[in-house]
Each structure stands twice: as C-alpha cells, then as structure tokens.
C-alpha cells in the first residue's frame, strides 16, 4: 500500500481539526454543566459561543502554519507545524485519558480516537520517514508544542470569553 505524503496530511489537517471541533462543540455544553466542579475550572469558558471563537482562532493558527509550511517548506515552518501537530496528538491522548479517568465519554473522545490520533501520528510519521525532520527533532518539537500551545489555548479562551461577553452586552443593549 502506498504511503500518504506529509504534504497530503498537511492539506487534510484543517479538516481533522474541524471534525474534532464540531464534536466538542456539540457535546461540551452538557458535559460542562455536569462536570464543572470535578473537571472544568469555570463553566462560562465552556459556553458554546466562547468555545466557537476559541476554536476558530486555533484553527486559523494551525491552518496558517500548515499553509506556510506547504508554501515555503523551510525548517522553521516545518518545526512550527510539527510542534502544533504534536500538541494536537497529545490533545487526542488527553481526551482518552480524561475519559478513562471519568469512566465515561468526554467531548472530543470519538474524533480523538477515530481521526485525531491516527492523522497526527501519520503526519508526524510521514515527516520522519520523508526525512523532513529527524526523529529526535520531531520528539523535541512535540515537547516544545506543549510549552507553546498551553499558553496559546489559555490566551484564545480568555480572548474568546471577552469577545463573547462583549457580544452578549451588545445584544442586551
């Protein structure tokens, strides 16, 4: 069987993210209401409008990085993309871990298992097998992705919360 190239996986990456985001958006509100005190720190951050804005911001960042890598193919763009892909892989693993801890379905679990983990692992595997980055570099980039994406996600949730609040205030006036 013919392997799917790194470039093809990058073209598919926004679709993978969208599938995962849609599942989370459809299932998060109910989950957040049921588990705020046990798992989630603040219910209002997981309100559909706030989540939608944050997910759009993340998708724009990831899609922009993938497009830059497709257009330029430099080590810098490839390093950035591999960090983001690695962080997304770990996000998928986190969904599985959270579901195991709670012993129930959690938002994003189905797409994490069926789409996110296989696609991100295949993307990183293709980058390694095509010698675009060495395996040790890929490992370092995945770890770097954790350090970068955690604060980015927190920033996106914060700004999306503020934007959603501004929208609610405008609707009420």
Image: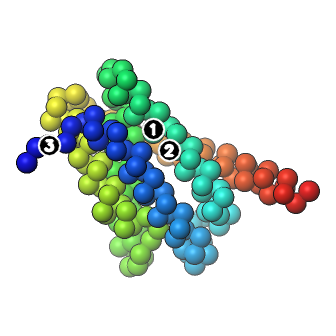
Give SS at disc 3.
loop
User: 165 left or right of 52?
Assistant: right
**Residue 3 numbered mark, or none:** 3
**Residue 123 numbered mark, or none:** none
Q: Using the image as rendered, state which of residue 149 and residue 48 is in the foreground.
A: 48
- Tag 2–tag 1 contact (CB < 8 Å): yes
| Residue at the (41%, 26%) spot, across then down | 68
Q: What residue is pinned by disc 1?
A: 63
Label 2, label 3: how far apart the Cα atoms are? 26 Å
| Residue at the (10%, 43%) spot, across then down | 2
Give SS at disc 2.
helix
Which quadrant of the figure has residue 80? top left
Which quadrant of the figure has residue 112? bottom left
Q: Is residue 149 placed above or below 165 in the rendered structure?
A: above
Q: What residue is pinned by disc 2?
A: 59
User: 125 left or right of 33?
Assistant: left
Q: Position of residue 30 (x, y in %)?
A: 57, 75
Q: Position of residue 44 (x, y in %)?
A: 68, 63
| Residue at the (73%, 49%) spot, across then down | 162
State whether residue 148 appears in this view: no
Farthest left residue in view: 1
Which quadrant of the figure has residue 20? bottom left
In front: label 2 or label 3: 3
| Residue at the (60%, 57%) spot, across then down | 51
- Looking at marks 3 and 1 on the same chain, the residue that comes earlier in the sequence is marked by 3
Farthest right residue in view: 173
Q: Position of residue 145 (x, y in %)?
A: 40, 40
Count neighbours of disc 1 (C-alpha within 10 A) and say few if under 14, some if 14 to 19, many if 20 or more: many
Label 3, label 1: how far apart the Cα atoms are? 23 Å
State the count of labels.
Answer: 3
Label 2, label 1: how far apart the Cα atoms are? 6 Å
């Amino acid at each position: 069987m013919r392997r799917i190239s790194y470039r093809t996986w990058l073209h598919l990456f926004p679709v993978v993210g969208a599938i995962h985001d849609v599942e989370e958006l459809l299932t998060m509100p109910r989950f957040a209401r049921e588990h705020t005190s046990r798992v989630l720190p603040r219910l209002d951050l997981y309100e559909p409008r706030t989540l939608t804005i944050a997910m759009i911001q993340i998708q724009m960042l990831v899609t922009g990085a993938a497009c830059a890598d497709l257009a330029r193919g430099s080590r810098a763009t490839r390093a950035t993309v591999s960090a983001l892909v690695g962080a997304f892989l770990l996000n998928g693993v986190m969904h599985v871990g959270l579901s195991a801890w709670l012993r129930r379905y959690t938002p994003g679990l189905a797409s994490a298992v069926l789409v996110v983990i296989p696609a991100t692992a295949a993307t990183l595997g293709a980058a390694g097998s095509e010698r675009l980055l060495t395996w040790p570099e890929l490992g370092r980039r995945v770890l770097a992705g954790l350090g970068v994406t955690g604060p980015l996600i927190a920033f996106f949730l914060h700004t999306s919360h503020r934007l959603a609040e501004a929208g609610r205030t405008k609707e009420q006036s």
